[in-house]
Image: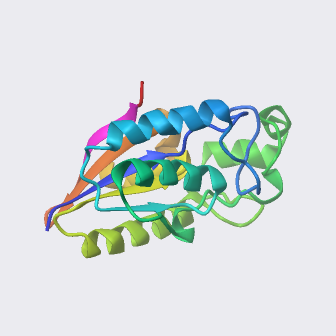
């Protein structure tokens, strides 16, 4: 029943860390991000990936398409369950602007019991991502699958596997174009690699 899930964070867009992209349309990989995605894809070429799935955001689809091309796979399957957190009116704001918002500060202090302006909490994110990955694992027994998503979505899954509260999200990083590997079997799931960054 063993399944290996490679959880990939999308490559960097041009202003990663400058503003909260969230679910904004048109946030794509720039020249540096495309090169990063190509290096990641080349690294995964021999990983024997059976299928690739991606968040609907352009930056995830572009990263997944680079991997699919390198691995000779069909076009990635897009899944809304892998989408970025719905940040609502926060999307597009700079982090300096967000730091002045008391709700933003509360969200980052206690994500287990705070919701974004769009009404999504970290537990919602965790549940939708886990449902999708569990179904994906059941369909791919004995295989290795890749999932291209966002830092907080990957963190939510990792925290579940490690038995951590979702409030532990700031204790580890998920960098752009990194790979986090989870192996699931009848006995449960374990974390094999965390935030393995392409050089």
Task: From the top left corner, tell me how far across and down residue 97 is, in percent.
Answer: 86, 37
Task: From the top left corner, tell me how far across and down residue 110 is, in percent.
Answer: 60, 48
Closer to the camera, 62 or 196? 62
In the displayed structure, would residue 126 be above or below residue 165? below
Closer to the camera, 154 or 8? 8
Please tell me in which quadrant of the rendered image residue 115 appears.
Answer: bottom right
Task: From the top left corner, tell me how far across and down residue 150 is, in percent.
Answer: 55, 50
Residue drawn 47% across the image and 64% down it: 75
In the displayed structure, would residue 48 be above or below residue 35? below
In the displayed structure, would residue 190 be above or below residue 178? below
Residue 196 magenta: yes
Closer to the camera, 164 or 150? 150
* Quadrant of the image containing the C terminus: top left
Residue drawn 50% across the image and 43% down it: 169
Residue 199 magenta: no
Residue drawn 55% across the image and 66% down it: 124
**Drawn side of residue 130 relative to residue 23, left or right:** left
In the displayed structure, would residue 74 be above or below residue 147? below
**Drawn side of residue 94 relative to residue 59, left or right:** right
Main SS of the magenta segment?
A: strand
- Magenta residues span 191-197
Residue 159 visible, this orientation: no
């Amino acid at each position: 029943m063993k399944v290996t899930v490679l959880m990939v964070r999308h490559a960097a867009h041009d202003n990663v860390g400058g503003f909260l992209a969230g679910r904004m349309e048109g946030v794509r990989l720039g020249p540096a991000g495309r090169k990063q995605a190509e290096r990641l894809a080349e690294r995964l070429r021999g990983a024997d990936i059976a299928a690739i799935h991606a968040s609907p955001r352009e930056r995830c689809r572009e990263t997944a398409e680079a991997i699919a091309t390198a691995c000779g796979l069909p076009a990635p399957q897009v899944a809304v369950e892998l989408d970025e957190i719905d940040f609502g009116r926060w999307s597009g704001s700079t982090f300096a602007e967000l730091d002045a918002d008391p709700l933003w500060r509360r969200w980052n202090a206690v994500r287990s019991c705070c919701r974004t302006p769009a009404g999504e909490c970290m537990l919602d994110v965790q549940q939708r991502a886990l449902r999708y990955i569990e179904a994906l694992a059941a369909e791919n027994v004995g295989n290795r699958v890749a999932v291209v998503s966002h830092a907080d979505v990957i963190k939510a899954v990792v925290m579940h596997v490690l038995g951590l509260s979702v409030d532990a999200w700031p204790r580890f990083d998920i960098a752009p174009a990194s790979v986090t590997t989870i192996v699931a079997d009848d006995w449960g799931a374990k974390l094999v690699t965390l935030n393995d960054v392409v050089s």
